[in-house]
Amino acid sequence: MPDILDQKNRKARKQHVCSYCVGIIEKGEIYDWCKLKYENTIYEWKAHKDCMFVAGELWQYIDPYDGMDEDQFCGGCQDFCSVFICPGCEEYDMGECKRDNPYCFDKIVEILKKYELKMKKTSTYQWEFRLHERCDKERKE
């Protein structure tokens, strides 16, 4: 697991690439910046505010051992979408999403601002994830 040496919000003076979704952080956009150290290597991590929020919410769901990279983030978003969003979506038909993206990020953010993802033990060795209405009011806004 990387050590966080420094973390802050920054306003982009130029375009950057989000370390989670690999999308563009536009000039003037507020983003999350971290300086990390892992196995004697120091590096920067830049992320959209919504990507940082979603990564934090899906951390337990994705269960990364050494931190979450872009593949784990995108895979977790795809899995979350297919379990919690696609079944009730009008753009989902016969196991296929009609959208070009592999997951509906805007809907993931919207759902996770209203609901918390919690684990429930279903048997001795099995757990199930469920959405519960949030108690923390600041996340709803």
Image: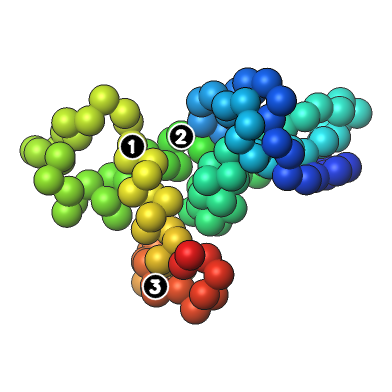
Position of residue 16 measured from the top left corner of the image (x, y, whole percent): 64, 23
Position of residue 23 measured from the top left corner of the image (x, y, whole percent): 51, 26
Upstream in the sequence, badge 2 or badge 1? 2
Asked whether the residues under the numbered discs 2 and 1 touch, taking CB atoms below 8 Å apart as contact, a structural biologist would say yes
Residue at horizontal 61 percent and vertical 35 percent from the top:
29
Amino acid at pointer 3: His
- State the separation of the CA atoms marked 2 and 1: 8 Å
User: Badge 3 is on which residue?
Assistant: 132
Write down the quadrant of residue 24 in the picture: top right
Position of residue 125 measured from the top left corner of the image (x, y, whole percent): 45, 65
Q: Residue furthest right?
A: 40
Residue 74, numbered label: 2
User: Badge 1 is on which residue?
Assistant: 103
**Residue 41, placed above or below residue 89:** above
Asked whether the residues under the numbered discs 2 and 3 touch, taking CB atoms below 8 Å apart as contact, a structural biologist would say no
Residue at horizontal 19 percent and vertical 34 percent from the top:
97
- State the separation of the CA atoms marked 1 and 3: 21 Å
Amino acid at pointer 1: Tyr
Q: Nearer the viewer, residue 29 or 63?
A: 29
Asked whether the residues under the numbered discs 1 and 3 touch, taking CB atoms below 8 Å apart as contact, a structural biologist would say no
Q: Secondary structure at mark 2?
A: helix
Which quarter shows the N terminus? top right
